[in-house]
Amino acid sequence: MNSELDLENLRLKDWLEPPQNSDRVWFQKRGRVFEKILNGMLSKEQMEPRTSMRPSGEEIDGSFAIGESFYLLEAKWHSSPIPASSLYAFKGKVDGKLTGTIGVFFSMSDYSKEAVDALLYGKELNLILFGHDDLILIEEGKIKLREAMRVKRRYASNYGQPFYPLKTYLSELEASSEDTTTRDQGASWSILVEGESDVGAIEILLGRCGINARYNVVAAGGQLAVAQLAEHLMSNNQRHVAAIVTPISDAELQHEQISKLIDLGVEIVELKHGVEDWLDNYVSAEYHNATFMLTNRNGKMARRYARNADIEKLRSDNPTFERLLQKLQGDAEDRL
């Protein structure tokens, strides 16, 4: 093995941010690192990986095994979230294999909200998705890859959803292990957003609002995944769940999703725009004009807007968001 890519010294976190003026060679090298690390994760747990790097250097094909079950894999690390077209193409490959074959997609660049939702319109769900946070948690030893596969497969079987954030699963485990005294100190909230790019912006907003409650902001993976994840959480004794939802082009489908959240008793923040566009309404024209040409990789623009938004006006204009803040703050005070 090339000493430059010695597996012992490779960490995904070390390759998250490209250096300034990175050329194609750097991204190809990162792709080779990703292949080595992914192979290492699979080999470490005796999952018999067989992978190969595509000429582009940023995409990996292959397969692996768990017992007598075999899985196709595809892995990508691009500068932008994986679009629906990439998942469709991979699904097409899986559809052409032995009946019952499951494909597993590993993406260090996460997925567009539309990509995950698009899979739900198909006749058969045969993909399981791993995102950036999932892979980091596995690399850090917070969860084994075999266990991650088991919980993601079970979630897909129960709810017909290809994506289940491992952060949510680990939070559930932590909550179940808390003693009664700890639980009585105040409720822990799960705040669901649609995409990974929304998580950082909402966390920044909550921090700026001085919220000290116990909460996790979790990406459901798409607009059509929020209600299912809320149902799963509440069926597992998570009593305090909020959802920040944005418009779906299909009004009937939007109504169906909102109705399900209401029936579940979820605290709903219904926005009239996507998170980035919503926040853009609360930054000054000068700030908007000064930043609109900057990179927007992985939700950076939404996070910029969250740091610079007029919080008082935002809270005044959005009563459902303000109500969520009041509930969070009330729970924080109950812990004191």
Image (spheres, helix red, strand yellow):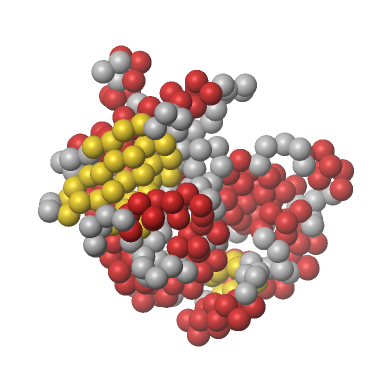
- Residue 171, image x, y percentages: 37, 58
Outermost residue on the top side: it is 3
Quadrant in the picture for residue 296: top right
Residue 147 lies, in percent from the top left, at 24, 53
Toward the left, the furthest residue is 68
Q: Is residue 135 left or right of residue 66?
A: right
Q: Position of residue 215 (x, y in %)?
A: 49, 60
Count the numbered circles shown. Answer: 0
Q: Residue at x 43, y 44 (%)?
A: 107
Picture quarter containing residue 292? top right
Q: Quadrant of the N terminus?
A: top left
Residue at 67% across, 49% down: 302
Q: Residue furthest right?
A: 286
Residue 69: image location, x then y, percent: 17, 54
Residue 70 in view (yes/no)? yes
Work out whether 65 lies above or below 211.
above
Please say whether residue 207 is visible from this viewpoint. no
Quadrant hosting residue 318: bottom right
* In the image, residue 46 above or below residue 199: above
Q: Nearer the viewer, residue 230 or 67?
A: 67
In the rendered image of this protein, does residue 215 appear above or below residue 256?
above
Residue in the image at 55% along x and 37% along y:
79
Residue placed at 51% from the left, 47% from the top? 82
In this rendering, the answer to whether 275 lies above or below 256 is above
